[in-house]
Image (spheres, helix red, strand yellow):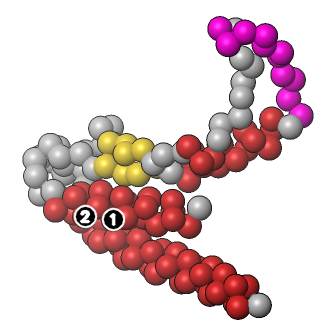
Amino acid sequence: MLQRALDVNTLRYQVTANNLANSEVPNFKRTSVCFESELKRALESEKNDKDAFHMVTTDERHISSSAPYDYRTVEPRRVVDYTTSLKANGNNVDAEQEAMQIMKIQMDYRLLTQLENFEFNQMKIAMKK
């Protein structure tokens, strides 16, 4: 999960940097990355699947009942905001907001790398014993 979070954070950084670089381009629309909501939905589907009713299928051509959404297959999605326009030229990127987002992403990345380092240290300790 930590590796996946680092990958998503890297993608978020690239997308935000692209938004910031195009903050003055006419008709450019801001892009964001959605991952956490999809991950939450997958984890909830696995939790709710335990008590759910399941149909038995005897052939692979049969329609299966709703299977849980595996959290390991969740991929980040890029979402373009076409609905808003912040400036008169049709651009909806707020450079100040994007700069703050980059700072937040960098802090999140540092935290995730510290967590990963902690995990590796725990493994080293366990392997020494």
Instruction: Judge by depth and name the residue closer to the eye, 96 or 53.
Output: 53
In magenta stretch: residue 60 = yes
Instruction: Judge by depth and name the residue closer to the eye, 24 or 59.
Output: 59
- Vertical order, 39 against 119 (above or below): above
Instruction: Kindly indicate whether the residue at mark 1 contacts the one at mark 2 (C-beta within 8 angstroms).
Output: yes
Type of amino acid at the residue the image marks with label 1:
Tyr
3D distance between C-alphas at marks 2 and 1: 6 Å
Near mark 1 (Cα within 10 A), the count class, few <14, some 14-19 or many ≥20, is: many
The circle drawn on residue 17 is 2
Question: Which residue appears at 48% of the width and 46% of the height?
Answer: 75
- Vertical order, 9 against 34 (above or below): below
What secondary structure prevails in the magenta region? loop
Q: Residue 28: x, y in percent?
A: 17, 46
Q: Residue 7: x, y in percent?
A: 43, 61
Q: Where is the C terminus found, in terms of image quarters?
A: bottom right
Q: Residue 60: x, y in percent?
A: 67, 13
Instruction: Judge by depth and name the residue closer to the eye, 23 or 15.
Output: 15
Q: Is residue 40 left or right of residue 31?
A: right
Question: Which residue appears at 65% of the width and 37% of the height?
Answer: 69
The circle drawn on residue 13 is 1
